[in-house]
Amino acid sequence: MTVLLMRYGFEFRYYRRSFRQPLRTSHGLWNIREGIILKLTDEQGHIGLGEIAPIKLFGSESIRDALRFCRQLPGEIDASTLTAIPAALPACQFGFGSAWQLLTCPKPEPLEAPLSYSHLLPTGAAALQSWQPFWEQGDRTFKLKVGVASLKQELQQVEQLLYALPAGANVRLDANGGLNWNEACQWLQACDALNTATIPEARVEFIEQPLPPDQFEVMLKLNDQYETAIALDESVATIDQLEACYEQGWRGMVIVKAAIAGSPVRLQQFCQTANPDIVWSSVFETAIAQHFIKTRLIPSISRSSRAIGFGVRHWFADSALNQTNFEQLWQSL
Ligand SMILES: [Mg+2]
């Protein structure tokens, strides 16, 4: 018997946008975000937009791989195209999978409380001048990249920031795997001391990916040894890796960058079984992927009240790709 699969029109457009100022991480400087917006159209003319926002440094495909994949597809696709996207293209799996869900799945119940945001602050002394507007918006969580300058200098800056922030503020420290064992212990010790002191009143919520992903066993040990929590990030870039860390005993926090993790359906299935402690995070994607993650993915998966790491709009020079009028956004490409 021949099964006739529903066919969808497929178009895609490339985008490229500059960071207002280059983003400094322990991997180096990042100047330009590139990605792809894809459009699926069903036979009734309904449209689902998806976004492919790869970061090769984080273990996803490169933008070049993603473009090559899109270019070899025909102008019409069906469900078999989705299931055939290789595991080596997790950002493509997300982009197609999210557009597909928009067209074929009912919207989940919205969250009861509005999402709160974590804001990435610039490194160095500038952090002290940057948190106030976000605080006034009602957000209480801030993130700093560490492992970039000397430990002594950075520790001092973190202390200064904690003393400057009001009670109720949380600070996340992201090392991007740039520390060694000794440095990680020094950071965790210092954070334990700061968190148990009466002053400062602000707290370190967790240290993100202190060591490189190949030192998983050591991070398991560190997570047991100190009070300050560790959140895995680069170690769990894709759903395959997230599953592998769970199998090896990780029950701590995990950062999920949904846009590069792979198929949203698989993520939903994994989370329903394992119920991980998730911190949702951005990969500097446009409003298209952000909207899907916030209104579809998060409500279908987690009821956690942890701030989501999507406070990144102010990092881009343009605003066209931040807008939620998606018709206009598509036209701007
Ligand atoms: Mg991180």
Image (tube, rainbow, N blue to C red):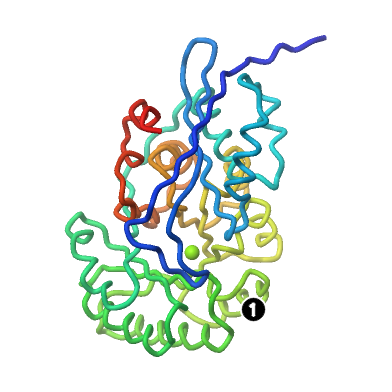
In the image, residue 14 sits, relative to residue 181, either above or below, namely above
> In x, y percent, where is residue 59?
62, 57
> In x, y percent, where is residue 45?
47, 13
> In x, y percent, where is residue 201?
25, 77
Q: Which SS class for mark 1? A: helix
Q: Is 158 displayed left or right of 165 in the figure? A: right
Instruction: Give the residue drawn at x 71%, y 11%.
Output: 4
Which of the two residues, 10 or 106, is positioned nearer the viewer here?
A: 10
Which of the two residues, 55 or 269, is positioned nearer the viewer here?
A: 55
Which of the two residues, 315 or 154, is positioned nearer the viewer here?
A: 315
Q: Is 217 displayed left or right of 13 in the figure? A: right
Number of numbered discs visible in the structure rendering: 1
Instruction: Give the residue drawn at x 65%, y 39%.
Output: 68
Instruction: Give the residue drawn at x 53%, y 41%.
Output: 52
Tell me the residue that label 1 is attached to: 218
As drawn, which residue projects farthest toward the right? 1
Q: Amino acid at mark 1?
A: Val
Would residue 48 be seen by someone viewing this image from the given angle?
yes
Would residue 230 be seen by someone viewing this image from the given angle?
no
Picture quadrant of residue 95: top right
